[in-house]
Image (spheres, grey):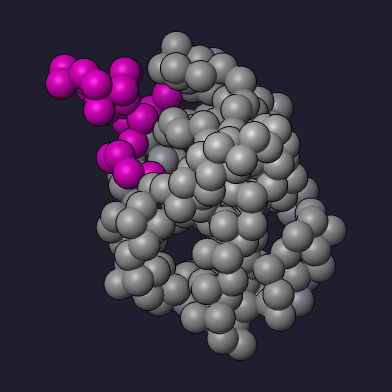
Amino acid sequence: MRIVLRIGGSVVASPVNTDLMNKYAEMVLTLKGEGHEVAVVVGGGALAREFIGIAKKLGLEEQSQDEVAISVSRLFAQLFLKKLGGMGCGKVALTLDDAVECLNTGKVLLMGGLKPGITTDAVAALVAERVNADLLVKGTDQDGVYNKDPRKHADAVKLNHVSFDDLADVFSESKHKAGIHQIIDPEAVKIMKREHIKLIVVNGFKPDNILAAVNGESVGTVVN
């Protein structure tokens, strides 16, 4: 299978969790060992949002705020890449062409942000579209998709399956803004819906959930 793995910055980078990063590196190598092709897109998390705040205080416009956040996400991608050693491509992919080139060599692709105006969720969806991925798995700071924000509502219920159409009812934000933080970015949903890309959202604090999702076990929320 060709898998795009989206690791939320809220999971590995808020605060930075090196033990978890090590576990993710091991898990990616396990997927490779099982014969899968793997692309990994990493978010910048709290550190990226901190830099967005700094850029704002400096009076920089939203595009510049986004560019700074992208740099942070690419730093995390670089750390993962170094950890993978020879199994990863030589550098963090900066374009979709880079992504295709990397996967065609049979190595693990690492990416952070791509360009201002889109989140790393949308980057993962664009990569999945471009390389014809079989599955996109997102590791988040929640157990899956809920009918409302579980951080604000104690009675929120986790959904085992949801359609892309129904996701709109769950979202608080319907368009991009620098530092947007919700379970799945609305722009990414549009791409996945258009291309019929299957998405599974799991609790990213347990990397074994990713393996379970890839192996067809019932975990998190399936979106299609």
Compared across the picture, whether 29 is left or right of 100 comes to left
Which residue is located at x 45 percent, y 19 percent? 171
Query: How far from the left and from the top, in percent, is residue 53?
Result: 51, 40
160 lies above or below 132: above
Pick the quarter of the image with the N terminus.
bottom right
Closer to us: 100 or 174: 174
Q: Main secondary structure of the magenta part?
A: loop
Compared across the picture, whether 125 is left or right of 10 comes to right
Query: How far from the left and from the top, in percent, is residue 48?
Result: 51, 49
133 lies above or below 178: below
Which residue is located at x 75 percent, y 70 percent? 102
As drawn, which residue projects farthest toward the bottom? Answer: 86
Residue 147 sits inside the magenta stretch: yes
Compared across the picture, whether 148 is left or right of 26 comes to left
Residue 133 sits inside the magenta stretch: no
**Residue 198 appears in the figure:** no
Which residue is located at x 45 percent, y 41 percent? 200
As drawn, which residue projects farthest toward the right? Answer: 97
Q: Quadrant of residue 111?
A: bottom right
Closer to us: 113 or 220: 113
Query: How far from the left and from the top, in percent, is residue 218?
Result: 31, 44
115 lies above or below 166: below
As drawn, which residue projects farthest toward the left? Answer: 154
Closer to us: 195 or 48: 48
Compared across the picture, whether 181 is left or right of 15 comes to right
- What is the total number of numbered labels drawn onto the structure image? 0
**Residue 182 appears in the figure:** yes
Magenta region? 138-162
Query: How far from the left and from the top, in percent, is residue 73?
Result: 57, 56
Q: Quadrant of residue 141?
A: top left
Q: Quadrant of residue 197?
A: top right
